[in-house]
Every structure is written in C-alpha cells, then in structure tokens.
Image: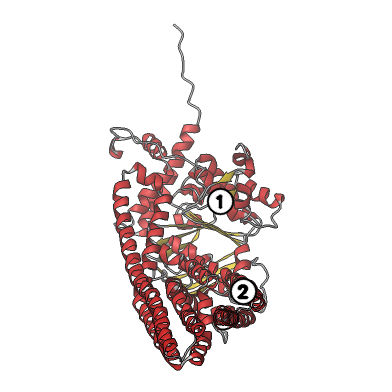
C-alpha cells in the first residue's frame, strides 16, 4: 500500500529473493564449468600431443563431455527459473496493474496513459524471462576468467582488463544515449496503438462520414514518428552493439597475437595461448550480451520506475470491517466536484437528503453538471469539498466491491462487454443465479425483448454491444443496473434511446425500485423520465437551484402524473400557424403533437435567456396543455344530428 514501509513493486521483486539466490548459485556453477573448454584445450595441446597417449585423450574427453552436459542442464534450469520469476512478478502485480489501468480514466488519464501499466508490466516480465538477467548475473564472475588469464601470464591478464574496461564503457555510453530514444519510442508506440483502437471502435463513423483519408493521414503522422523514434533507438543500440562485437573479435585476435609472441619467447605454451583467447572471449561475453539486451533492459527499467509510482495508489484500501448494506438514506452535503485533471469545479454547493422509497428526477440544460453529480453519487469522481453519505457513512468508508453491489448505475454512454446477455446483466458474477437475472430483466421490462432473440439470454454481444440496437443496449444496461436489487440506482439519460414501450418499462422500473425501499435518481431531458419520481431537482450552471416535490417544483400538481410516458415527437407541419391565429383546442392539439419531449427540451434550452422560474412555468403549462390536448383527442366525438327529408 501507499503507506506501507515497502513499495508494492519492490515487495513483489524481493519476494522472489529465494529464486534469485538459486539462480545465482546455478550461475556460479555454470561459469566455473565454462572453464572446461579452455582446460580441455590446454590438456590436449600440452599433454596428449606431447605424450601421444590415447587413454589420456579418452579420459579427459569423457570428463569434458560430462562437464558440458552438466553445464547445459544447469543453464536450462536457470532459464526456466528466470521464466518462473517473471511469471511470479506478473502474478503479484497484475491485479494492481488492472486496478491502475481502470482507475486511470477516472483520474483524467488519456487512453494512451491508461494502458501504460500493462505495457510496463509486460516489459518487466519479458526482460526477466529472457537472457538479459543472465548477463547481469554472469558479470560478477568475469574476474574469475581475468584471474585465470593473469595466472597464464600477466600481459594476457592486463590485455583482458583493458578490453573489459572498454566494453563496459561502451555499455554505459549506450545506456545513456538510448534512454531518451527509448522513452520516445515507447510513447509514440502507445499513441499509435491508441489511434488504431480509436479507428477500430469508430470504423462506422469513419466510413459514413468519409473520414478514412483524413484519419489515415493523422495515423501516418503518428506512425511515422514512431518509426523514426524506433530507428534512432536501433541506430544507437545497434551501432554500439556491432562495435562491441567487433571489438571482442579484435581482442581475441590480439590475445592470440600476444600469446604467439610469448610462445616464441618461451614464456607460454601453445595450449595456454589458445586457452587465454577463450578465457578473454568468455570474460567479455556477459557484457556483450548485456549490450544486445539493452533495449529490453531500458524498457524494463522505465516500466519499473513508473510502476513504483503508479501501483501504490492503485492498491485498494484495506478496511478493518465491512459496513452493512445501506437501507435508509442518501445525503449530499455542500458537494463540490472538480473533474480529474481540471482546476475548476463543475458543480458546487450541492446539498440534499432523500430517504428510502424516494425517486428524484434531475433536469437542467446540457452542461449544467447533472452527469457530474451522477458520477459523484456512485463514487466514480471524488468530492473536492463536501461529502456523500449512505446511511450516514461517507462513500469512502465502504469497500469498493461492497459499495458496487449496493449501487445500480446506467451511464449516458452505454457499454456492454464481450459475452452473453446474461453475463452482462449479472455483472459477470460467477455466483449469479437465474432467478436474480430474470428478476432484473423483468423489472427493466427487457425479458420479452431478450427471449424474442434467437439465442435469448445466451446471445453473445460484441464489444460495446455492437450486435444490438441502441434501445436494446439501453434496456439491457438498465437490467444490469437493477441486478441484485441495489439500494441506490442512478440512471443518466436512461430513455435517450427508448421507444414508447421502453419509456413505460422505465417508469415501471423506477416505481418498482421505490416500492421495495430503494432510492432512484433519474437524469433526463424528457418528461417521460419523470413519470415514476416524486421529487425533482433543477440544476443550472453547476448549482441545484430547485429541489423538492415534483409537482411543487414544476409548479402544477399532477402534471407529470398525467403525462403519457413515451410520447414521441411528431414532425412539424410544413407551414405551421402562429399561436395567435389558432383556437384554444387547436393550440392544445399542436402542443400535444409536438410531444412533451420536445417541449421540455425547448424550455430547458431557453434557460440562458429566461429565469428558471419562468422556464419551469412554461414546462408545467405546456405539459398541462399537452395533457388537455391528449384528453380531448381521447374524448368521443359528439354524435351528428341527422334530419329526414
């Protein structure tokens, strides 16, 4: 946790300490066994060739073969252990990484930054499971080969030391020169991935609006920048890597040349000369391997640095006890919300209290802060000031999972997940029962719609519910919000894609939630959304200007109750008459034809030029007139008198 004595990422690495110790021990044995080739060559040149003894050759050959077999087996086990270490670190950090990725958009992060934790963890796992760590582990054993070179002849030892220092200097230079290009390449790759994802998700709009060429041009700019960044990184690491390899070959030849000179002078045997060349190459091999894995090492190092900062904040708070499910009240006290990444409050000074069985309809013009309040009520955005309480307890006192089970939320932008309709409604709960799923769909009025599909509840929907219409997605999402009988249900524009039947089902669902003792908050621009509520709040410019009983706020008792949920907006006549030219019954008929949805939208749209009280009066008057017109339409026409001739 953020407040723990050890960072969660550091703890995940240190938990693999025992495995690293085993890898180090195996590496020590492997590096000692790597002396086999040099010793074997020395014995063949200095003993077998001099004595011409076949038994000696067979004996040392069998010993060398056994040493090589043991070396190969230990190296295989070492690589498997590194793979297990990478998997262990991934298993320890992946849950927190998922939390960080899901929390990032809630904190205002861009789509590019939201996926960064997963890429960083993948980079760490890939490096730990590769040969890169073996190079770092083998480096401390490099002095062993240098000592053997000194034992053969001091000049050979100093030559090996000089070559080693040169390779190390090249590695440090390469690491410093590659850090900035590596960061740029990672960033541009993330931007490229985000653009591809955006294009995939919005393929229909790109095709219908003729935006493919313009989108492709923007993508090509980002892709070109990524290719350029990758080329810079490759040129720097590849160039230094090639030079390091070439330098190692030169150094091997130099050792042979110096060894030949010493053999001529009688200070070294031929076998020792060849052994010194092999020893020098082996001493430099870990450094060369490190250079070849420099790109993955830089990516893992940067990912480790970022995760150390990000993951402690993503670790869920551990609460000493779980509060019981809320049953009684919702209170908002002097609430102010600043959006993630913003500096100015969208809503401020919001205060109200409602009890079990209440239904609140929030109305107001677009941009007045209704959806912001909805996000705050369900705990998505945290208050900058004030507090939201369920049964007297602040939302922060609840465990996120417990709070989620007590809340039903239908956002404006309905998103379904890949899976069956039943799984989406059940929130992918593995303990979900058929009874609970059916109860939610029947309350949402979606059961008949779902069973009418060919596969029914087993219908597989694509990402975002791509195989369903907007109204179908909204009704399934409403059932998901009602699943499990949550105490607080927040519906943001729940009827924006519904037809008349869906409006009636929504009103029935709102009444059902209230009837079982729940609380419903409905945000709407259509009067049909207010049919099931008993309270109304009006928001203007981030403030709650009106709040109270529905009929009192609207200024006319019974207006909403008499409004018909789901009345559609009819197209206006080509040349409508002015109100002054129309009789009263024609006015009523005209207003009813416009539909209450258009009336409320028009009235709320005029808030910029009129006072809220005036607009509310217009809404109430228009809805009453619409209701009167609808009543007049339903009344039977008077019988026409006929006369006999």
Q: Answer with left or right where residue 62 lies relative to residue 186.
A: right
Residue 430 visible to the viewer: yes
**Residue 486: where, in percent of width, then height?**
63, 60
Q: Between residue 168 and residue 98, name the one nearer to us.
A: 168
Q: Mark 1 or mark 2, which is nearer the start of the sequence?
A: 2
Residue 446, above or below 489 = above
Residue marked by disc 1 = 418
Viewer-side label of 2, 1:
2
Q: Answer with left or right where residue 56 lies relative to residue 632.
A: right
**Residue 197: where, in percent of width, then height?**
42, 55
**Residue 372: where, in percent of width, then height?**
44, 64
Mark 1 surroundings within 10 Å by alpha-carbon count, few (fewer than 14), some (14 through 19), many (20 or more):
some
Q: Answer with left or right where residue 459 lies relative to residue 576.
A: right
Which structural element holds mark 1?
loop
- Position of the C terminus, as image quadrant, is top left
- Position of the N terminus, as image quadrant, is bottom right
Q: Between residue 278 and residue 580, name the one nearer to us.
A: 278
Outermost residue, top side:
645
Q: Between residue 549 and residue 369, name the one nearer to us.
A: 369
Which structural element holds mark 2?
helix
Residue 78 is tagged as: none
Residue marked by disc 2 = 68
Residue 195, above or below 41 = above
Mark 2 surroundings within 10 Å by alpha-carbon count, few (fewer than 14), some (14 through 19), many (20 or more):
some
- CA–CA distance in space, label 2 to label 1: 52 Å
Q: Residue at x 48, y 92 (%)?
A: 150
Question: How many marks on residues?
Answer: 2
Q: Answer with left or right where residue 150 lies relative to residue 588.
A: right
């Amino acid at each position: 946790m953020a407040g723990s004595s050890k960072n969660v990422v550091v703890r995940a690495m240190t938990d693999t300490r025992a495995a690293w110790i085993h890898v180090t021990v195996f590496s020590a044995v492997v590096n000692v066994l790597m002396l086999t080739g040099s010793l074997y060559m020395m014995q063949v040149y200095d003993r077998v060739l001099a004595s011409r003894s076949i038994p000696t050759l067979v004996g040392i050959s069998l010993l060398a073969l056994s040493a090589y077999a043991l070396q190969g087996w230990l190296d295989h086990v070492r690589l498997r252990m590194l793979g297990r270490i990478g998997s262990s670190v991934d298993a320890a950090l992946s849950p927190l990484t998922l939390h960080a990725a899901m929390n990032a958009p809630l904190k205002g992060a861009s789509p590019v930054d939201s996926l960064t934790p997963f890429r960083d963890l993948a980079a760490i796992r890939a490096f730990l499971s590769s040969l890169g760590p073996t190079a770092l582990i083998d480096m401390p054993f490099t002095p062993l080969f240098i000592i053997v070179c000194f034992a053969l002849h001091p000049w050979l030892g100093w030559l090996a030391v000089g070559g080693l220092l040169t390779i190390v200097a090249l590695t440090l230079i390469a690491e410093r020169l590659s850090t900035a290009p590596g960061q740029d390449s990672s960033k541009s790759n993330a931007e490229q991935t985000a653009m591809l994802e955006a294009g995939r998700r919005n393929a229909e709009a790109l095709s219908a609006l003729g935006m493919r060429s313009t989108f492709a041009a923007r993508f090509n700019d980002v892709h070109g920048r990524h290719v350029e960044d990758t080329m810079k990184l490759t040129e720097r690491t590849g160039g230094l890597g090639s030079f390091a390899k070439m330098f190692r070959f030169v150094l091997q030849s130099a050792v042979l040349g110096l060894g030949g000179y010493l053999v001529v002078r009688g200070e070294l045997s031929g076998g020792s000369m060849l052994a010194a060349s092999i020893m020098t190459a082996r001493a430099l091999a870990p450094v060369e391997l490190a250079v070849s894995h420099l790109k993955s090492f830089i990516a893992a190092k940067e990912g480790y640095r970022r995760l150390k900062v990000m993951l402690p904040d993503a670790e869920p708070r551990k609460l000493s006890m779980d509060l019981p499910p809320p049953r009684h009240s919702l209170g908002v006290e002097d609430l102010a919300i600043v959006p993630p990444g913003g500096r100015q409050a969208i809503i401020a000074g919001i205060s109200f209290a409602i009890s079990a069985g209440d239904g609140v309809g929030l109305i107001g013009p677009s941009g007045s802060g209704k959806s912001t309040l909805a996000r705050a009520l369900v705990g998505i955005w945290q208050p900058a000031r004030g507090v939201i309480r369920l049964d007297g307890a602040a939302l922060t006192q609840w465990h996120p999972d417990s709070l989620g089970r007590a809340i039903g939320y239908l956002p404006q932008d309905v998103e379904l997940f890949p899976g069956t309709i039943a799984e989406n409604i059940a929130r992918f709960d593995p303990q979900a029962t058929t009874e609970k799923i059916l109860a939610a769909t029947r309350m949402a009025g979606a059961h008949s719609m779902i069973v009418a599909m060919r596969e029914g509840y087993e219908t597989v929907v694509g990402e975002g519910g791509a195989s369903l219409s907007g109204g179908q997605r909204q009704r399934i999402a409403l059932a998901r919000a009602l699943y499990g009988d949550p105490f607080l249900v927040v519906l943001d524009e729940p009827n924006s894609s519904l037809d008349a039947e869906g409006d009636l089902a929504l009103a029935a669902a709102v009444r059902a939630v209230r009837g079982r003792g729940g609380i419903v908050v409905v945000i709407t621009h259509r009067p049909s959304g207010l049919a099931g509520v008993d309270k109304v709040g009006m928001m203007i410019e981030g403030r709650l200007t009106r709040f109270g009983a529905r009929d009192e706020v609207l200024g006319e008792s019974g207006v909403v109750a008499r409004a018909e949920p789901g009345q559609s907006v009819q197209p206006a006549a080509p040349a409508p008459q002015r109100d002054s030219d129309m009789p009263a019954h024609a006015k009523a008929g005209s207003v009813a034809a416009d539909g209450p949805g258009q009336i409320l939208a028009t009235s709320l749209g005029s808030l910029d030029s009129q006072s809220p009280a005036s607009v509310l009066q217009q809404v109430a008057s228009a809805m009453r007139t619409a209701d009167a017109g609808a009543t007049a339409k339903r009344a039977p026409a008077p019988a026409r008198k006929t006369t006999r001739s």
